[in-house]
Amino acid sequence: METVPSFSVTSDENEAITCDSPCSEDGFVDVFGDLAALPVEVCERRPTCLRCRRPQKVCLCPFLPLHPLEVSTCLYIVQHPAEESRVLRTVPLLAACLPPGKCNVLVGRRFSEEKHPELAAVCRDSRTLILYPGPNAQNLEELVQNQGGQQDQELGTVKHNIIIIDGTWSQAKYMFLRNSLLHLPKQVQLSRALSSQYVIRTQPSNICLSTLECAAVALSILERNDDIQEVLLRPLRALCSFQLQHGAQVHHSKEHLLKNGMYDKPMPKNKRKIKRMEKLVTDRNICPR
């Protein structure tokens, strides 16, 4: 059996100094001592604008309305905790465009009546709607139109509540299915054929919208004022334009990538995920062979 030579450091005078020698230990101590004596640099966060919540150097306040929009609708954003750590969020821009108390953000995954009595009261209010697509969802625009006619004058004075889930589509689905409170309000969805302008973040399909875009369309319908949508989308366009000018790439939707043969990720093996992706593409079979 061969013997394993011990580690050694050889000097110019061919004198071997083993690791067990006091000199080498002192040397290591000196090295680590020098490192410990180095000053610690504290990373200071960039100053943040108090209104748009963006760094002051890239403040988007010039693109916000001069005065908050006067709306009767009250928004309740039920936000997944992961959204808080995202840099490019749209909810702060939405809140900056509306008066205090008109955009309420509740962060969490599970919401019970005991821990969130305010949300529970809102969910039980007959004037509350939850914006979440599905087979049981009614078209929001049709709902407002049906409430016209005899109730038109009353509709102008009613203070509507609308709940929007803020998170990825999988997070939003989890939160909707796991929270019975969110099943109490009337479920509505948007039917306007709009393409998302939030091009710096990937969407599942071409018609999927960001939270700010959903709120902009919903408010313009409920308030019967299309100018609201334009005002709310202005800071979002500015945000995306700035990011693209500084190296960000346009994120096409998964639907666009699949239809144009640009999807370069491995296809899923889960049958439900495969069926979900097949729904995005109707003109070709995308199942893996």
Image: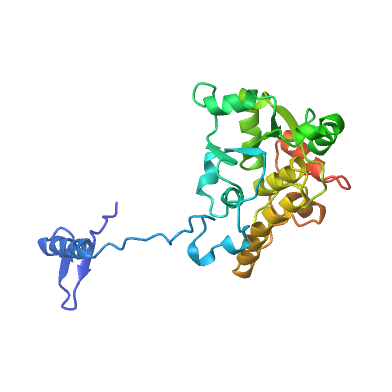
Q: Nearer the viewer, residue 91 or 21?
A: 91
Please name the residue shown 61% across and 59% down the image. Answer: 66
Residue 111 in view, yes or no: no
Residue 8 in view, yes or no: yes
Residue extending farthest to the left is 22
User: Could you tell me which quadrant the C terminus lies in?
Assistant: top right
Q: Position of residue 262 (x, y in %)?
A: 76, 57
Q: Position of residue 163 (x, y in %)?
A: 65, 35
Determine which quarter of the picture holds residue 18: bottom left
The answer to whether 219 is drawn above or below residue 42 in the figure is above
Please name the residue shown 64% across and 63% down the image. Answer: 238
Q: Position of residue 205 (x, y in %)?
A: 76, 47
The answer to whether 42 is drawn above or below residue 159 in the figure is below
Q: Position of residue 212 (x, y in %)?
A: 66, 48
Q: Is residue 96 left or right of residue 145?
A: left
Please name the residue shown 73% across and 30% down the image. Answer: 187
